[in-house]
Image (cartoon, coloured by chain):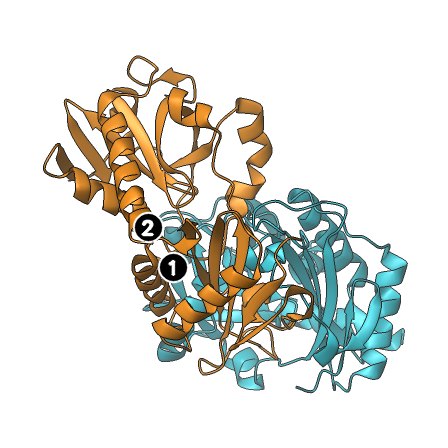
Chain colours: A orange, B cyan
């Protein structure tokens, strides 16, 4: 494991010495939230936004992040300095803490840890040619919180590999919500349509939509499976992948099967915004 | 914590020395299954049935229990001997193991541990007077496997306490499936109706239904919310609670609001079956 150090409950320790109790309710009952940010030029990108979302997820589960943003930022800086990554993803995890009976937990003693991983961005070809999604009927249990439950995604990894797909697109039989690890959007008649029910707030998505709002119309509301098939373009946004054009969904080709002009504009916008972050290094 | 020893990946260790990695995919992605059995007179009850269900849950997630039933049984016996319980619940937990990247895992290196807890059965009044359930629209993601995700139940604990309810009754708006921690049944015209879609196989439920099958008709199929309201009796079965009459669901009284005769017959049957276990001590 390249990651040598982790932050656990107030201390930076070697990964091999970071011990989570088998009685942790995050492990026994999946009672946990997390967030994931990336570095650009080795420095956290959109840190404030990710911390805000992390605290919102915690609140939704009646969990409290036990330390302030400054301590979290300092811990991240120290981990990034000690661990040897080209670029990293930084994972904040908060659970309900140790549960002697396997069902209840004390809100005053959560488990909070921070891990870093080497960032693995998709190959260039994914950005140039676009990617495929496969649809899957699924409703995340607490859509507005980033909980740790990814059992449906992990159970479909083999199917994604078989189909050469980048991610699952979740829907309820009629309406689409989001991809398993990304926000999802369609473009029709030069307007970006943003599914707004049962989705997690996307940090990169909101950043590029805000950047684009003078250039293109954005409508938030219901996006149906029929809208997806009929779209001119589709794209996803995520922390690790930025903006990726979606050119196929199941057996349907989206638009002409290439990454569309509005998606390319947003990809340019994301590049510009990340360059600004680099310049402020 | 009264539990002093746990079994972890082949060894019995003190709970304080049992270290789960923060990179465990059971913690980071909820990729884990478990099972829970109870002791009667200090000895495991329905061990074979729970081991069978545990292996079935594991298989559903493409996980492999790394040791045989004999080693598991021996580990449970040792834990029960070393830990000081009046009666215990025994929890088997299997995760995908350590995941350096927080997404993938090696199927050959799972994490497998066994914990014991003091058994807390409901007070006698619950058996005498029956209990209340509150309905909740929810579909477990992998209903046929006992996964560790109980976020919906834990998020509704305050509501259960407020309403004086024993458990949630899951439904999809029309059909009921199971309680959050128990199997659920209704009785109409002297026939027990067993919801058979999207439910976990219940060890105690199957035991008492098998015992009852000469005495009462059992029908497996769809049970609707309307059937529940219209039922003569309702009951649940679970490992920790045995058979419990359900006399109220939300604001509806079931039957005459007392524990019904067929439910009492099954409670008697469960008592007889547990007495047999005691006699074979």
Residue behind mark 2: A200
Q: Which of label 2 and label 1 is nearer to you?
A: 2
* Residues marked 2 and 1, same chain: no
Residue behind mark 1: B136
Q: B36 or A82, which is in the foreground?
A: A82
Residue sitting at x 25%, y 29%: A186
What chain letter is assigned to the residue under label 1?
A: B
Q: A238 or B206, which is in the foreground?
A: A238
Q: In the rendered view, would you say A166 is above or below A73?
A: above
- The image position of residue B273, as x and y in percent, is 76, 69
Q: Secondary structure at mark 2?
A: loop
Q: Quadrant of the C terminus of chain A?
A: bottom left
Q: Is residue B233 visible?
A: no
Q: Secondary structure at mark 1?
A: strand
What chain letter is assigned to the residue under label 2?
A: A
In the shown orientation, is residue A266 left or right of residue B61?
Answer: left
């Amino acid at each position: 494991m390249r990651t040598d150090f982790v932050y656990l409950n107030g201390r930076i320790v070697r990964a091999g010495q970071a011990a989570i109790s088998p009685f942790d309710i995050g492990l026994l009952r999946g009672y946990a939230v997390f967030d994931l940010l990336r570095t650009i030029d080795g420095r956290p990108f959109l840190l404030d936004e990710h911390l805000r979302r992390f605290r919102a997820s915690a609140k939704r589960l009646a969990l409290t992040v036990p330390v302030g943003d400054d301590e979290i930022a300092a811990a991240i800086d120290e981990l990034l300095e000690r661990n040897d990554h080209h670029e990293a993803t930084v994972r904040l995890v908060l659970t309900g803490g140790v549960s002697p009976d396997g069902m209840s937990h004390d809100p005053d003693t959560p488990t909070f840890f921070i891990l870093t991983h080497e960032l693995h961005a998709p190959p260039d070809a994914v950005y140039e040619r676009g990617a495929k999604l496969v649809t899957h009927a699924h409703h995340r249990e607490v859509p507005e919180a980033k909980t740790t439950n990814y059992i449906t995604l992990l159970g479909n990894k083999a199917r994604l590999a078989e189909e050469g797909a980048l991610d699952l697109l979740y829907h309820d039989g009629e309406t689409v919500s989001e991809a398993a690890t990304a926000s999802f959007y369609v473009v029709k008649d030069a307007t970006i349509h943003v599914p707004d029910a049962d989705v997690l707030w996307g940090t990169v998505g909101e950043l590029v939509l805000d950047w684009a709002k003078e250039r293109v119309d954005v409508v938030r509301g219901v996006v149906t499976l029929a809208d997806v098939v009929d779209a001119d373009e589709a794209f996803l946004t995520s922390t690790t992948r930025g903006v990726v054009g979606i050119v196929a969904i199941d057996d349907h080709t989206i638009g002409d099967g290439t990454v569309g002009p509005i998606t390319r504009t947003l990809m340019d916008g994301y590049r510009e915004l990340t360059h600004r972050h680099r310049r402020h290094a």
